[in-house]
Amino acid sequence: MEPKADWRFNIDREADADWTEGLRKIFDYRDLGIKAATSGDYVAQIIRSNGKREEDEVQHWHLHECTFQMVYVLNGWATFEYEGEGVRTLRKGDCINQRPMVKHREIAYSDDYEVLEIVAPADFRTVVVDAPEGAAGAQPAAEAAD
């Protein structure tokens, strides 16, 4: 396999981490430099709860216009509902390959929720959509199924 000519070597050091606001105001984001290193083919970021609690569009049904999305839970937990998959709670150490264009919504998350997310392409769009057929109602996280 030939390496991509426009990709470059990158190291992102925790000591130099720059936490910024991103897609959601309730989370802080740390870009790991993969977007620049892959010329926008991928983005890798750490996303963590920042203590703010306000509703946003991602708590409604939505999808991401992407070709790949992987999320690894570094800390805490979150409960989501996925089209065709039902309500799922992801906990520390869990990893999900979220298939492209799957409708989903966040139901709840812990105060210490933190994940590593890798998405392709880096500049994916998030689109609010109607709930899919047969979607369950919102459930408190304690009642959510795995």
Image: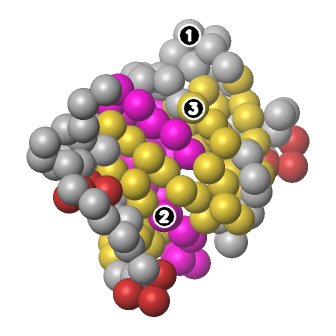
Check disc 2 and report its element: helix, strand or loop. strand
Mark 3 vs 2, N-terminal side? 2
**114 drawn magenta:** no
- Per the model, the C-alpha gap separating discs 3 and 2 is 16 Å
Residue type pointed to by label 2: Ile
Q: Earlier in the sequence, mark 2 or mark 1?
A: 2
Task: Identify the residue shown where x is 82% and y is 39%.
Answer: 144
Q: Is residue 63 visible?
A: no
Res 97 label: 3
Tell me which residue sits at (42%, 80%) in the image: 13
Count all numbered tags in the image, as a single digit: 3
Query: Residue at left 73%, top 46%?
Result: 94
Q: Which SS class for mark 3?
A: strand
| Residue that badge 1 annotates | 133
Res 117 seen here: yes
Report x, y in % for residue 86.
70, 23
Quarter of the picture holding the C terminus: top right
Label 3 to label 1: alpha-carbon separation: 22 Å
Q: Position of residue 79 (x, y in %)?
A: 70, 45
Are circles 2 and 1 on residues that touch, CB within 8 Å? Answer: no
| Label 3 or label 1, whichever comes before in sequence order | 3
Q: Residue furthest left?
A: 6
**Residue tagged 2:** 46
Q: Is residue 96 above or below residue 136?
A: below
Answer with left or right where residue 96 lies relative to residue 89. Answer: left
Report the amino acid beneath label 3.
Answer: Asn
Magenta span includes 63: yes
Q: What's the magenta region?
A: 46-71
Indicate the colouring scheme.
secondary structure
Q: Separation of disc 2 and disc 1 at Cα? A: 32 Å
Pinpoint residue 35: horizontal percent, then vertical percent: 26, 54
